[in-house]
Image (tube, grey):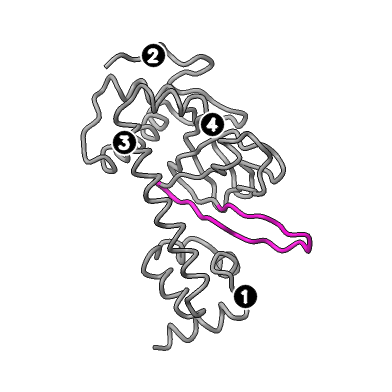
Amino acid sequence: MAYMPDFEESTNFGYLTDQIPAELAGLTNMFDKLRKYIDRVTSAVIPDEEFVFIEKAFEVKRLRKRQFLLHQETVCRYMAFVASGALRQYSIDSNGFEHITNFAIEDWWISDRGSLISQTPSRYNIDAVEDSVLLVTTLDKLNVLKEQSLSFLKMAHILDQNHSVASQKRIEASITMTAEEKYRYLMTANPEFIQRFPQNMLASYLGLTPETMSRVRKQVLAK
């Protein structure tokens, strides 16, 4: 396989706007997580040369709790792999209410795909619920990776499939499930969310009021 030259404006351990006071070994560990993730998703071992190429397409970004990766009404610039921490994606309506559409924890990806691909303003905010370390890349670099790395292309294809299935299940859940069924499904599908995110955020994610969420949670725990 032929590899493209090094990406411009990027190094193996490039920093973005937020400085990262970490040792080189710590940064290497962040990229190790991405490599292990790609190996796991593709059920293969990525060659060293190919991963070096992938690594150069990403830069490290640290977000402190409540800092933003994306602001509503701005164009999404990044696709982000969560090396550590937790984030949420949400919109704010005209009445000031938050509507959470996605969560992301370690080994998850987060972005507004529609805004990133179309380069149009996003309807969403993405911010950190916990201090987080991300590996981020741009649309242009993603496209190059898909053209030049078979491992990355395979991983992206699997992620797209999983994203479509998960989106369909969320739509079905919002239409057909009762409040208790939604909470039980969350407990089964993403039990980590219940441990990592506050109850009011979980309520927004499930489309429930905080009062309904509290009642349902008590009912489930009582059984």
- Report if residue 106 lies within the magenta region: yes
Is 114 part of what is drawn in magenta? Answer: no
Position above or below: 72 against 206? above
| Earlier residue among tags 4 and 3 | 4
* Callout 1 amino acid: Pro
In the depicted view, which residue is nearer to us: 96 or 15?
A: 96
Q: Which of disc 1 and disc 3 is earlier in sequence? A: 3
Stretch in magenta: 88-107
Residue 222 lies left or right of residue 131; in this view the side is left
**Residue toward you, 30 or 200:** 200
Three-letter amino acid code of the residue under disc 4: Ile
152 vs 1, left or right, is right
Farthest right residue in view = 95
Q: Are marks 3 and 1 in contact (CB under 8 Å)?
A: no
Q: What quarter of the picture does the C terminus occupy? A: bottom left
Against 31, residue 163 (above or below) is below
**Closer-to-camera residue (59/212):** 212
From the top left corner, tell me how far across and down residue 93 is, in percent: 73, 59
Q: Nearer the viewer, mark 3 or mark 1?
A: 3
> Label for residue 210?
1
Graded by Cα atoms within 10 Å as few (under 14), some (14 to 19) or many (20 or more), the crowding at tag 3 reads some
Work out how far the residue at label 3 is from the one at label 1, CA to CA, in angstroms: 40 Å
- In the rendered image, residue 18, in percent from the top left (x then y), is placed at 60, 32
Secondary element type, mark 4: loop
Q: CA distance from mark 4 to mark 3?
A: 31 Å
Q: Which residue is mark 4?
A: 20
Q: Amino acid at mark 3?
A: Lys
Residue ID for mark 2: 4
Label 4, label 2: how many angstroms apart (C-alpha)? 28 Å
Sequence-wise, the earlier of marks 2 and 1 is 2
